[in-house]
């Protein structure tokens, strides 16, 4: 059965999504982002208790090996639907949630059956035997500018032949563009490092117009996480400043091209001890932290108006 004491295959995650869709037909609707290179469906679910809510978009598992992200996304979905905690009910019922638990479906399957440390998608490149594009370098936002992305198909950060050359990123960008007027917050779930990364990724010499607000809501997230019994610490700031220069990332594209003003990459547990191979005993603690953080961040952004 499904649960959060182990990591699951794509097949099991999709079967669980089907159960959720059948159990909450009034509240949950499935959406299809599009198809991956290998022809798999990229699925999302929308949770909506009433019309007119502000939308929150969650992209998860763009990097295949970051299994904690889809485990956290599914736990989060379950919590929004089943929790009786007042703060969670408020969170669930006063936002429309668009959640894609496994975005890089081909890479995710490959990380289960062949190579646990796989990161990229699974599309081939002409003239190379190397496979896969780093989908988080393929978005049309300062694509291939300033470093942090590669034009070598064998590199882990290969950005692809052009912005949106990949069916996955093209489809998700089109899906988000279609709902962007209803969405003002986006989270891209990653691991690891315990950091909240705002725009920009492509430069550390410029900052978004609302950078002060972005820092303020990130502080609310970090404080809320730290206040839990686990005492986990998160750092925050712009991607380029806190982590490294990287262009063509989802949350930068969402901010720059889709006008989604609160747009964060969240790098979950841990800080490197287990790294990408985070034991499943961390799933629930990590998810609880994420819920606390997102609750506090959205409350703070509501304050800001
Ligand atoms: O390099 C990445 O894509 C992310 N780190 S990871 O270890 N999960 O691969 C960081 C992305 C930072 N976000 C932006 N630059 N916008
Ligand atoms: Zn990642
Ligand atoms: Zn451990």
Image: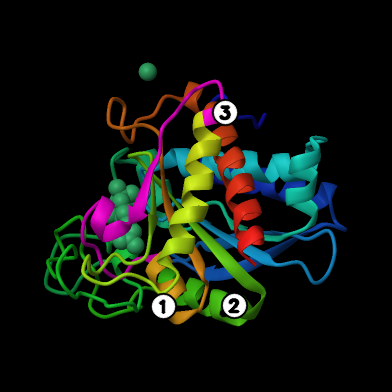
Q: Is residue 96 above or below residue 140?
A: above
Give the quarter of the figure containing the N terminus: top right
* Range shown magenta: 227-250
The residue at which mark 3 appears reads as: 284
Given residues 202 and 305, the one toward you in this image is: 305
Q: Residue 133 vs residue 181: left or right? A: left
Asked whether residue 120 appears in the rendered view, the answer is no
Task: Identify the residue at image location x=63%, y=80%.
Answer: 181
Q: Residue 67 vs residue 157: left or right? A: right
Task: Identify the residue at image location x=55%, y=21%.
Answer: 229
Say if disc 2 is inside 8 Å of ligand 1: no
Magenta residue check for 238: yes
Q: Earlier in the sequence, mark 3 or mark 1?
A: 1
User: Local crowd at mark 3 within 10 Å, few (<14), some, or many (≥20)?
Assistant: some
Q: Secondary structure at mark 2?
A: helix
Could you say where residue 203 lies in the image, as x and y percent from the top left?
Answer: 22, 69
Q: Residue 293 vs residue 119: left or right? A: right
Q: Is residue 145 above or below residue 3?
A: below
Q: Earlier in the sequence, mark 3 or mark 2?
A: 2
The residue at which mark 1 appears reads as: 256
The residue at which mark 2 appears reads as: 180
Could you say where residue 175 lies in the image, as x and y percent from the top left?
Answer: 56, 75
Could you say where residue 301 lies in the image, as x and y percent from the top left?
Answer: 60, 59
Work out how far the residue at label 3 is from the one at label 2, CA to CA, in angstroms: 31 Å
């Amino acid at each position: 059965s499904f649960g959060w004491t182990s990591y699951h295959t794509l097949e099991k995650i999709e079967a669980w999504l089907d159960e959720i869709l059948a159990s909450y037909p009034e509240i949950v609707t499935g959406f299809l982002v599009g198809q991956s290179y290998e022809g798999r469906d990229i699925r999302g679910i929308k949770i909506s208790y009433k019309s007119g809510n502000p939308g929150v978009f969650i992209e998860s598992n763009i990097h295949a090996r970051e299994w904690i992200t889809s485990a956290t996304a599914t736990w989060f979905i379950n919590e929004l639907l089943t929790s009786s905690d007042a703060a969670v009910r408020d969170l669930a019922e006063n936002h429309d949630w668009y959640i894609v638990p496994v975005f890089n479906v081909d890479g995710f399957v490959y990380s289960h059956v062949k190579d646990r440390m796989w990161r990229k998608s699974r599309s081939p490149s002409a003239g190379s035997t190397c496979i896969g594009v780093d989908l988080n370098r393929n978005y049309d936002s300062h694509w291939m500018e300033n470093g942090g992305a590669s034009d070598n198909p064998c590199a882990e950060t290969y950005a692809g032949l052009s912005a949106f050359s990949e069916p996955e990123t093209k489809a998700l960008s089109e899906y988000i563009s279609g709902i962007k007027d209803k969405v003002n917050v986006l989270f891209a779930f990653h691991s690891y490092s315990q950091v909240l990364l705002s725009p920009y990724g492509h430069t550390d010499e410029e900052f978004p117009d609302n950078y002060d607000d972005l820092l303020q809501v990130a502080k609310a997230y970090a404080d809320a996480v730290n206040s839990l019994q686990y005492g986990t610490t998160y750092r925050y700031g712009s991607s380029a400043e806190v982590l490294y220069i990287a262009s063509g990332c989802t949350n930068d594209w969402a901010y720059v091209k889709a006008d989604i003003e609160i747009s964060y990459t969240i790098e979950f547990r841990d800080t490197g001890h287990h790294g990408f191979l985070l034991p499943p005993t961390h799933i629930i603690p990590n998810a609880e932290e994420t819920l606390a953080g997102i609750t506090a961040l959205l409350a703070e952004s509501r304050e800001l108006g």
